[in-house]
Image (tube, rainbow, N blue to C red):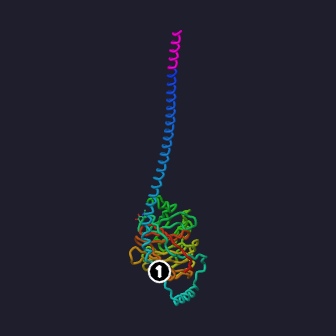
Amino acid sequence: MRGLVVLLTLACFATAQHQALIDYLERRLLAIEDRISLWHEQTTRYASELRELKQQMVSQLENLDKEKEALRMNLDGVGTRVDRVERELDYLETQNGAQPCVDVDDKLIEQQVTLVKEKHKGKYLKLSECSDMISNIKAMKILKRVGGAKGSWSKDTSMGSMKVYIFNGTDDDTIHEFSSVQDFTRSPGLSVAKTVKLPSAWKGTGHVVYNNHAYYINQAQEVMVVKFDMRSSSVTDSAVFPVQDHIPVYGLTPETLIDLAVDEEGLWAIYATHQNEKHVSLAKMDANSLDIEQMWDTNCPRENAEAAFVICGTLYVVYNTQQPGRSHLQCVFDVNDMVSNEDAPLVYFPKRYGAHTSLKYNPQEHLLYAWDDGYQILYKLIMKKKLEI
Ligand SMILES: *[C@@H]1O[C@H](CO)[C@@H](O)[C@H](O)[C@H]1NC(C)=O
């Protein structure tokens, strides 16, 4: 009996010990499981944080790329602007100190009024409502240098045309045609131009292209104005210019006897003859028939004149000053007698090369297409009304 009790006690003891071990192991296992799940949690968090970081890096890299591209474009823009500023700088220089001084004398005004009244008898009656005159030059743009020192170039002055025509030199029988000013500026030399071969030679710098027709000066036996259809490549008309004893119209461009011009009113011829050899003469032409509608002897001297153009029936003659690199507008002649020399603004051309051999006005754009020592230049004009003086 005692032996059984001992045995039972021993067994109980063993079971109790065994139970304690199992409890202990279970607690350890639970603790380990907890830790594992903690690690797992942490690992997942780290992984997702890593993924987020990676995404942030990628998008920041993309932004950097974009910023780099924007910076590069800005730099390009700055380069072009520096270029333009450089070109326009001497324009501004010429503008400074050229402020006209206005000092009006009442008697002078009275005199002018009577003078205007007398002159009005010969007023040109065919003009339309056009009454713009030059106020100043707003900007210049040097587009290119192509061809010789002398020449002329212009856009076709008809509405909506983009084409640009180059008359290189003062004596040739070809015209170079570009599809647009951009095309002309971007392409090297004259190589991509369409070459238009004319049936006769042109001379001087007085040619224009107007409504798909080239009007050029031919000086074979007589001084002729020839009208050439650019679309059909054929001469549609030609006329002997009805004056005797031509002389060069501008003192500084001896090759040019007649300078054709287009304005809001149509076709004009600027010329000079022995009979009025000190001054420039002006004629209004019919662009269809090449007839002369009316002629005027102006008060604008030929001496030191470089070139001229017509805007709304007013002739503007540009002269070379004694100061190097300067041209200015000094003489105007208005066929409507609304603008006199005294009213005309003193306009300096920001020229820095030789002399202008031609200045062609485009009425749609208010631009002057200039040829200056082989440089093709655009001058943007600021206009005002003739009466706002
Ligand atoms: C332009 O004309 C000049 C002569 O004034 C000549 O020397 C030159 O070769 C011409 N250029 C082109 C591209 O035709």
Q: Is residue 208 visible?
A: yes
Q: Magenta stretch: dominant SS?
A: helix
Q: Position of residue 365 (x, y in %)?
A: 54, 68
Q: Residue at x 46, y 81 (%)?
A: 301
Q: Is residue 216 visible?
A: no
Magenta part of the protein: which range? 1-17
Question: Which of 89 and 254 lies nearest the eye of the viewer?
Answer: 89
Q: Position of residue 242 (x, y in %)?
A: 52, 78
Q: Residue at x 58, y 83 (%)?
A: 123
Q: Is residue 34 above or below residue 334?
A: above
Question: Which of 15 and 103 lies nearest the eye of the viewer?
Answer: 15
Q: Is residue 88 above or below residue 3?
A: below
Work out which residue is located at the far front of the displayed protein and give it. 2
Q: Which residue is mark 1?
A: 100
Q: Residue at x 50, y 30 (%)?
A: 31
Q: Amino acid at mark 1?
A: Pro
Q: Quadrant of the C terminus?
A: bottom right
Q: Which quadrant of the figure shows ligand 1?
A: bottom left
**Label 1 SS:** loop
Q: Position of residue 260 (x, y in %)?
A: 51, 73
Q: Position of residue 150 (x, y in %)?
A: 43, 69
Work out which residue is located at the far bottom of the displayed protein and give it. 107
Mark 1 vs ligand 1: CB below 8 Å: no
**Mark 1 Cα-neighbour bin, 10 Å: few <14, some 14–19, many ≥20:** few
Q: Is residue 101 above or below residue 30?
A: below
